Each structure stands twice: as C-alpha cells, then as structure tokens.
C-alpha cells in the first residue's frame, strides 16, 4: 500500500497534463467558431467548450472514458458498435497468432540450439524479418492468403504470429543455452541422450526466459492482429474501429478503441504473469 | 579398477597446443581411496575427467574396469561429483537424486527405494521433499554425493567436492565421507587442493605438478583405515603431510 501514493501521483499528473493538452489543442476550433459568431470567449467558456467538443483534436479523458463505457456496456454485445464484439474479433486473432508464434518460436529455438547450420542460417532471417515494417508486409500477407482462399481470422493470426515468434526465439535460445558446462557434463556422465538433455535440463532451465518472452510476444501479437485488420477495410475488430474512426474524424471512437486495445494487452500480460508465478512456484523456483 | 599407461592429453587452443597431461602411469585398485593434489594447471582435474570420458587422452591407454572410459560409462562404472553441487533448482532433493535413475530407466518403485537408501547413506533422511535452496551448502554437496551413489557405480570420482565449503563443514564432510567409503567399499578418485584433506582421506596420494601436467610423487599412506578426526595431530599424519608438501615444492622447483 506504500506504493499507492506515488502511483496515484503519477496517474494524476498524467490526467492533469492530458486535460491541459486537450484545452490547448482544441482551443483553435473554439476560437475559430467564436470569430465566426463575432463573440469573445472567456476562459471558463473556453475550458468548458474544449473539453466537450464532438470531434476534438484530443478528446478529454472523461470523453474517452464515456466512449469506452458506452462501447463496452452501452451496446448489445453482438452489435457492430460494441467494443466487446470488436475486442473479441481482435482477441481471437491475437490468441491464435500468439499460439502459432509461440509454437514456431520454441521449435526454431530448439533447432537453433541443436543444429549449428540452423543457428547460422535461421537467426539472420529471423532478425531480418523484424526489420521489415509490419505495415508494409501485412497487406501482402492478406492478399496472398486471400488468393489461397483464406480470409478473416487466419491471415490476421499469421501477421500476429509473424510479430510474436521473434521474442520467443530470442528468449528461448538464450534460455535453452543457460545451463552451464558443469550441468551438461553431469548429464554426459549419465550417458543422457540429446532428448533427455532437452527435456530434463534445457527446457526447465529455459522457462523463466520463456515467460519473459511471452509477455513481449503477446503484446506484439495484439499489435499484429490490429495491423492485420487495417488493410481488409474496416470490417471488424479494434483495428477496424481505429480505421473507421479516422475515416469519419471520430477521435473519441479512436481513443476508446486504443484504450480498449491497451486494456486487452494489459489483461493478457497479467494473465501470463499469473501463469508464470503459478508455474515457477510449482517448480520451486519462487522463494 | 583404473589403469593409466603413458597417458598424455594435449588441448589444441588458439594460443597453440597446451600439454595438460604427460606420460601419466597409475593403477588404482579396487576399494582404494586415491587423492590427486597439486597446484592449478597440474592436470589433476583433467585426469579425473579423462577417466570419466569427459576428455579423451591423445596418447597412451586408459582403462576403467578393463574397458575404455566411454564403454565404462555405458556400463555405469562411475558416479561423478563436481566442485559445485549442481542440483537442479526446480527439482526437490529426491527429484535430483531421481535424475540419473530416470535417465537410466530404473522402475518407479526401484527409484523410490534407491532414493531412500542413498538419502540415509548421506544422513539426509527427511530432506527429500526440500528444494536445494532450503539446504545449506554442505547439505547440498551431500545430496550431490547421494545422487552420484544412487545408481550403484563401483567408482566415485570427486572433483574438489568440498572446495567451496568452509573448514568446519569440510572437516565434518571428510569424516562422513570416510565412513561412507568404509560402508560402501567404493573405489574413490578425489581431487583436492588441501594437503590435510588429502592425507586424512587417502590410502594413496598422487602429487602432481604443472607445465606439463604430470605425476611427481605417489605416497602410500601408513595411516590405519579407521581415522578419527584427531588423527591429524599424530606424528604419522604430520610426517605424511610433510612428504606431500615436499613433493609439491619439488614439483614446483623443476620449472624455476
């Protein structure tokens, strides 16, 4: 509870800054309207107006909160205006992509650790893959998948997996290589097979590294799923909400969708954190 | 039984070849307790690792129970105790002792029976369900000895197993190790830096010297098998320790 005060202070400072920025950024439109009407704007009127515009440059925190509340609780869950509906569309692609990316990342890491040729050949490609802007490659993936007859969930998941496999590869390679020479020698004195070394030493030793990677990976998965929703033309998902919001200048809708995405991401990271604690406690690694 | 005839081992490094062992001739009989002592780089650990087939001699012949080191390993001829206990932190003490038994394919019932037996052998009954971090350094090293004993190898190879422990704990473990040796009648190869430890434990002390790593002296201990801790104040003990010290000094004198 001791840390509550600093946390609240920081939060309060952010909200205050946000309000100040909203007043400043939205004032141009208010002044503009006033000039056209030939009236003067008092300070209190300015504040009142800038924090309640319909299409503000920067919506005020309470506007976003209302937008978020309305999107989540104010609509039927199946409605096209419901953030729950769009959130679920994005979340399902995120989870599938995360599963694919994690499986692929672990498989590649195991290959890289056991095979020198793979170490030399796969890693540069994995790194290169992450230097390409995802926005550039996402439409290609959609188009290619579409020509193969795959639409909707799968192409989005592939883009999501494309982003999330990388932290898993990097973390797992490090984790699988974390046992020291003595621990490996010990298994050699038992005539342990490569499979035994992997299952009994390398994999358990890599778990703390895996969880750290998964937290980065799941956030990347969500970004991938959202980006994957953009080129399909705003059909469904949080990405679609962002896109349609920007088409129609609905800044409150954009910000509400952004916050919905952030909340989903935070929830996913917290879930992995809980899984991490439970697993490590079961393994006796938490003191 | 371990037999070395003209064993040499040269490492190829980036700075050129390094002769870790040169012309090592040694026979260790069944039931002996042989210590290897010498300064760093004298090849004592390398020799032990060669016996365990963790390194491979580049010259000479080395046999363990009449087999090559690799074949002897296949036949589970030895258990190896490293300088650090090296227990897996995610396994309990019993789980750590189970590790070699799992790999070697013992049945579940036999695993349990053997774990209980070796835990009592190293006086760790009741600690099977603890995790390594819940045990002191000395207890962890005892658990690692239990792990090496679990699959009933005739030979126990120990590479400075008590080197990281304080002297009081080390004395106790030395005493316990002697009792364990008497009870199990294992053949023990023991690498150490400590002259009192070598003299107290061994039936034979192999003194080695570096550059190139070689044997400079082999000292037969005249101490009785039954050795209370205060035997270290006896004249006989001090004489043997003196001979070891002389041997070490002599080995060093060669290169200066």
Image (tube, rainbow, N blue to C red):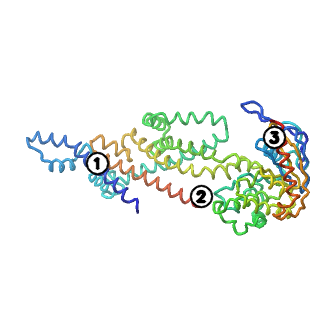
- At label 2, counting other C-alpha atoms closer than 10 Å, the crowd grade (few under 14, some 14-19, many 20 or more) is some
The residue mark sitting in front, 2 or 3, is 3
Considering only order in the chain, which callout, 1 or 2, is on the residue closer to the N terminus?
Answer: 1
Q: Residue furthest front?
A: B235
Measured as percent of width and height from the top left, residue A240 is found at: 36, 44
Q: Label 3, secondary structure: give it.
A: helix
Q: Which residue is mark 2?
A: A285
- Is disc 3 on the same chain as disc 1? no
**Residue at numbered disc 3:** B252
- Residue A99 bears which disc, if any? none
Q: CA distance from mark 2 to mark 1?
A: 42 Å
Check disc 3: other Cα within 10 Å, few if <14, some if 14-19, many if 20+: some
Residue at label 1? Answer: A18
Give the letter of the chain under mark 3.
B
Residue A55, how many percent across, how many down? 23, 45
- Front-most of B199 and B110? B199
**Percent coordinates x, y for residue B186 in the rendering:** 86, 58
- Res. B143 in view: no
Q: Is residue A83 visible?
A: yes
């Amino acid at each position: 509870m001791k840390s509550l005060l600093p946390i609240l202070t920081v939060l309060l400072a952010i909200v205050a800054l946000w309000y100040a920025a909203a007043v400043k950024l939205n004032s141009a439109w208010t002044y503009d309207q006033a000039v056209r009407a030939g009236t003067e704007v008092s300070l209190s009127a300015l504040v009142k107006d800038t924090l309640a515009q319909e299409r503000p440059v920067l919506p005020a925190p309470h506007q976003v909160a209302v937008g978020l509340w309305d999107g989540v609780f104010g609509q039927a869950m199946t409605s096209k205006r419901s953030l729950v509906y769009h959130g679920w569309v994005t979340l399902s692609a995120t989870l599938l992509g995360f599963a694919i990316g994690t499986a692929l990342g672990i498989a590649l890491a195991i290959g890289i650790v056991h095979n020198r040729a793979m170490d030399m050949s796969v890693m540069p490609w994995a790194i290169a893959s992450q230097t390409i802007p995802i926005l550039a490659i996402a439409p290609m993936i959609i188009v290619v998948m579409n020509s193969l007859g795959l639409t909707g969930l799968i192409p989005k998941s592939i883009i999501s997996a494309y982003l999330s496999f990388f932290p898993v590869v990097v973390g797992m390679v490090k984790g699988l290589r974390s046992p020291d020479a003595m621990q490996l020698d010990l298994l050699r004195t038992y005539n342990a097979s490569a499979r035994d070394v992997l299952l009994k030493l390398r994999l358990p030793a890599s778990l703390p590294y895996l969880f750290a990677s998964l937290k980065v990976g799941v956030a990347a998965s969500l970004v991938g799923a959202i980006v994957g929703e953009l080129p399909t033309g705003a059909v469904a998902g949080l990405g679609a909400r962002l896109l349609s919001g920007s088409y129609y200048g609905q800044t409150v809708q954009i910000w509400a969708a952004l916050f919905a995405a952030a909340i989903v991401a935070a929830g996913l990271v917290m879930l992995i954190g809980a899984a991490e604690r439970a697993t490590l406690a079961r393994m006796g690694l938490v003191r | 039984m371990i037999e070395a005839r003209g064993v040499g081992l040269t490492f190829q490094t980036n700075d050129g070849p390094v002769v870790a062992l040169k012309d090592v001739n040694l026979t260790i009989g069944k039931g002996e307790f042989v210590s290897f002592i010498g300064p760093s780089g004298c090849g004592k650990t390398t020799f032990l690792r060669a016996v365990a087939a963790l390194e491979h001699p580049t010259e000479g012949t080395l046999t363990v129970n009449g087999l090559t080191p690799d074949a002897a390993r296949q036949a589970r001829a030895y258990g190896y105790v490293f300088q650090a206990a090296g227990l897996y932190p995610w396994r309990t003490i019993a789980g750590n002792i189970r590790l070699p038994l799992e790999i070697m394919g013992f049945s579940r019932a036999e695993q349990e029976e053997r774990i209980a037996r070796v835990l009592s052998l190293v006086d760790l009954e009741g600690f099977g369900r603890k995790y390594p971090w819940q045990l002191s350094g000395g207890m962890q090293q005892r658990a690692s000895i239990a792990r090496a004993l679990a699959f009933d190898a005739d030979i126990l190879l120990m590479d400075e197993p008590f080197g990281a422990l304080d002297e009081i704990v080390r004395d106790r473990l030395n005493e316990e190790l002697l009792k364990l040796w008497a009870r199990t009648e294992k053949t023990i190869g023991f690498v150490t830096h400590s002259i009192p430890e070598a003299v107290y434990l061994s039936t034979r002390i192999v003194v080695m010297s570096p550059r190139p790593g070689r044997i400079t002296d082999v000292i037969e201990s005249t101490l009785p098998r039954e050795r209370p801790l205060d035997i270290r104040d006896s004249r006989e003990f001090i004489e043997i320790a003196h001979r070891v010290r002389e041997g070490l000094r002599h080995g060093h004198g060669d290169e200066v």
